Amino acid sequence: KAGVTQTPRYLIKTRGQQVTLSCSPISGHRSVSWYQQTPGQGLQFLFEYFSETQRNKGNFPGRFSGRQFSNSRSEMNVSTLELGDSALYLCASSLEGLTEAFFGQGTRLTVV
Amino acid sequence: QKEVEQDPGPLSVPEGAIVSLNCTYSNSAFQYFMWYRQYSRKGPELLMYTYSSGNKEDGRFTAQVDKSSKYISLFIRDSQPSDSATYLCAMEEYNFNKFYFGSGTKLNVKP
């Protein structure tokens, strides 16, 4: 079966712009979580959605937001981009909880 | 102090060696423990998960959890060059829906 699909794979944006990333989970999975991965900080949890509801969030500023649609697809948005937002953004899907979460290939965001 | 500590390596071993990868943690509420493998420019791939303490084996991989010491391990037997990757541990409290990751250990298995 198809895995987790993230689009786009690569993105270059300018400081101050905003960006929207998309994640299509594995069919039947209702939980989608988002992560930021950087060489300095490693993998950091952004937020998790289940059935269109955010169940938990990490310690990121309000510029980072997300949502989940009724078909379980999810988007995350970053507004007023900063150079430090350059990272690999990963999403993962699972049936219900985070255990046995499967990751997508990620979206590599570069802010210039 | 970080919630999860993991030696970043790199760890270099010859082919066929037994590899031991470890993480320590500070939150005694963690109940689920996962190991992920990440190849360069790829997303993490789930290798194993364990609930609470104990051992779990899957092929060449064995995961161990010692909650009393707040210490988890992943052993790889008969290591292969294809095992060369970064290994990440992840932990979660029961029903908390939030992962905490280690920083990852980079493993290089030399032919």
Image: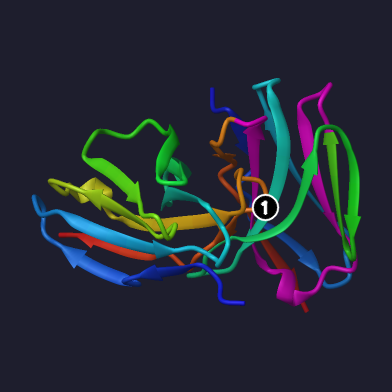
Decide: is B111 above or below B56.
below
Which residue matches tag 1?
A100
Q: Quadrant of residue B51?
A: top right
Decide: is A5 above or below A75.
below
Quadrant (top left/top right/bottom left/bottom right) for the N terminus of chain A: bottom right
Q: Quadrant of residue B57?
A: bottom right
- B91 and A112: which one is in front? B91
Residue at 11% in and 53% down: A15
Chain for mark 1? A
Compared across the picture, whether B23 is left or right of A104 comes to right
Quadrant (top left/top right/bottom left/bottom right) for the C terminus of chain A: bottom left
Q: Position of residue A72 (x, y in %)?
A: 44, 57
The colouring scheme, among rainbow, by chain, secondary structure or one colour, is: rainbow
* Range shown magenta: B66-95
Q: Position of residue A16 (x, y in %)?
A: 8, 50
Residue at 60% in and 47% down: A96
- B29 and B60: which one is in front? B29
Decide: is B78 above or below A62.
below
Q: Position of residue A82 (x, y in %)?
A: 17, 47
- B5 and B16: which one is in front? B5
Q: Amino acid at mark 1?
A: Glu
Compared across the picture, whether B26 is left or right of A68 comes to right
Task: Find out whether residue B85 is within the magenta segment.
Answer: yes
